[in-house]
Image (cartoon, coloured by chain):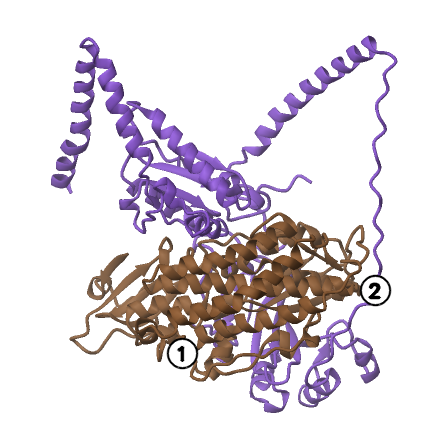
Chain colours: A purple, B brown
Amino acid sequence: MAQGGSGMGISSSGASVLVRQAGELIERAPGGIKLVDAVELLVAWGRANSVWPLVYATSCCAIEMMSTIAARHDLARFGYEVMRASVRQADMIILAGTINEKMAKNLVTLYEQMPAPKYIIAMGSCAISGGPFYYDSYSVIKGGDRLVPVDVYIPGCPPRPEALIQGILQLQEKIKKEGRRNPWKVRDTLKVPFEDIFSKAQAEWAEQEKRKDEELREAREQFKRDKPASTAPKSARLKKEEFPTPPRRKPAAQGISNWTLLQMIQKKFPAVEVHDHPGVSPKAVAELGPDYILDLVVPPEQYREFAEYVKNEQSLGLDMLIQLTCVDWKDSFDIVVQMLSCRDGHKLFFRSRAEKDPATGDAEIATISDLYLGAEWHEREVYDLFGVRFRNNADLRRIFLENDFPGYPLRKDYDDPTRVVKRPY
Amino acid sequence: MITESFSEYNLDGNTLPEGFRLPPPDDEEAEEFFVNIGPQHPSTHGVLRVVVRLNGETVVEVVPHLGYIHRSIEKMAENQTYVQNIHLSDRLDYLSAFSNNLCLCMAVEQALGIGVPERGEYIRLMICELQRLQSHLLWWGVLGMDMGAFTTFFYGFRERELINDIFEELCGARLTVNYFRPGGSSIDVPDTFMPRVKHLLKIMPKVLDEYSNLLNKNIIFLERTKGIGILSPEKALSYGCTGAVLRGSGISYDVRKHDPYSIYDQFDFDVPLGNTGDSYDRCQVRMEEMEQSLRILKQAAARFPGGPHRSQPQQNYKLPKGSYYSQVETPRGLLGVYIVSDGGIKPYRLKYRSPNFSNLNVLNELAAGHKVADLITIMSTLDLVIPDIDR
């Protein structure tokens, strides 16, 4: 590392010192400034027209970036089509999409790995400020410029391909004007990902608005003094549109009816009841309509047994797990399992209560991940976001958030002022 | 890519990286090491990170790591009204934004008993099918790119732009549309809608033939998809796979056909199925789905009715206490919206059941035993959209 480092040092910083000194010498000679200017212009022109972007595509904006490269908009016209997969070959990162906390470290590493001169375009609202995810989000970084220095901002959600091209042309302008401003100077990466700068800006904005209002009022009074006879034209009213209120098309019931399902299950599990409808009769179940999905409450001690029964009982025909999720009811969790019959088309939901530990808010319930292979990730998700532990799940790790993330964000009592900016309205 | 030799990893104790389950190899000649792909990698289609355990060039085990685009949409949903939530659903799976909107609106309609006028239903159906077309076109373009052919990318986007033009005239956006509302759509379709759809219907059959000629008999395409990444029907069901991944394995389940919503029950179309469940079948199912979408569009264009495009909007959509579930077939599979309401104007809990989450889960089953290059093709045939997985 030491050897390579010193070698690199001579070739990059040493060369730039030489260039600078030569430039200064020529500059002092009569007429030399014109030569320096011409060379600079040439270098800047060449650099501006051959910027190679990195494929850094995180979300929606990436699709518009692809559209920009593709046939109709054809980014190749501007010398930007050479998308590089490695940051070591690139000159520019287009931040196309949201950057969240887990991705932030990667972005900073990528920026630091990129050889100078290097540029960054923030494409879309998320990369500018967090966009639609500014408020209430516990994981989104509120703007790419909290992490790395941004050269051009392109507003839009997502921006149109033309807007991206416009942004790239702006960057070209910027590069052409750089001259000998020493573009090799590496700017620092910043690390203030969650600070609320909007409130500050809002206060300043409100101040300006107040001043503007006062000026307007004065202007209006002045206008009235000058032309007391003038009256404002009446504003036209939009015609209020009237729409019909047709009845809802009820979808046809599919597969085994709710009442049959309930009877089959209650024969085996008498303690099972219908959620929100205790002691239900066949007539009442029929009245719930064709698109009512049977939602059962299973006692927690029978939860695992019930899941096994649903899986193994062929006559129920429930062969697919739609999902396993969780609802936080302040004092306990409801683990909701949603089953579907691909064969017949009917659905069955069942839920079981997991009591919260009063001190920590944690809860525990048996796993069903060995019955349904897909349940393992769903259980990991519930563990990650709610902190419910699943007994005997083979791989109970956090799935979305990092292992050291404090708290469980989807709980109702989650509050982390360092990450979350609360919606002010 | 970072590589780390197995022996290096095992220097202190017999620990494997997170998520790996197979024991260390018995065979002394096995050259096992770990390769990290992503999260910033062009072939993972976003910010997916997979850690692959390789023996030479053969994949032993794959462990996907999620969360690099986790945006806390479900938490944000609890602080916004149902109509405000529609724009967030766009950003889940941005290639099927209309279907996502529709699913959320359908859950609200179910709770409040809101009806949709006939024209509104037709608009919904046609737009969703157009969306399916453009999503599959993009998938097709990128599929070729993942196998080293850049041509498909340009061809796929050529027709996709025509569909994007329709969306843009419709609602001003090409991708994140925020168009449907409970009871219909936010605005009526413009006059240019029908001519544009008819033009598309005219050219698309020829274009699809062109696509088939371009790729389907290509020896590289065949060798890299046939017999690669076989998913058995039992595994597909157990993992909860949906969409073309499930149908490629030969199980016929399409929400449009088997649990029809909107007015899909009035239309005549087939559900294409695969035989073996390999990558090739998944590709063919998607190609045929494009033809079926055209079939639906043709029928809908022939009897597109007049009248109002929506029912009377309400000031506040206040859902009665209870839980509601609706599901639609997006281009990638079954999307479910599960709403728990406490009687207020905002959901108490809003859960999106995203198709990609379950579809990605089978990656280890599919890729184990194949070469590392096939892993990329397999990921491509799963047609993943990562923000939909992470939400």
Q: Which residue is mark 2?
A: A246
Q: Which residue is mark 1?
A: B278
Left or right, A50 with reference to B341: left
Query: Do labels 2 and 1 touch, CB within 8 Å?
Result: no
Helix or strand or loop: what does disc 1 sit on? loop
Residue name at image x 40 percent, y 67 percent: B379
Asked whether residue A348 is in view, the answer is: yes
Chain ID at mark 2:
A
Q: Quadrant of the N terminus of chain A?
A: top left
Task: Name the amino acid, label 2.
Answer: Pro
Q: Quadrant of residue B34?
A: bottom left
Decide: is A111 above or below A377. above
Q: Give x and y (percent) for residue B131.
A: 57, 61
Q: Is residue B304 above or below residue A50?
A: below
Q: Please say whether residue B75 is visible from this viewpoint.
A: no
Amino acid marked by disc 1: Asp
Are the numbered discs 2 and 1 placed on the same chain, yes or no? Answer: no
Left-right relation of A154 to B153? right
Q: Is residue A208 above or below residue B90?
A: above
- Using the image as rendered, state which of residue A309 and residue A252 is in the foreground: A252
Circle 2 residues within 10 Å: few <14, some 14–19, many ≥20: some
Q: Chain of mark 1?
A: B
Q: Quadrant of the C terminus of chain A?
A: top right
Identify the element where label 2 is drawn.
Answer: loop
Q: Position of residue B391 (x, y in %)?
A: 53, 57
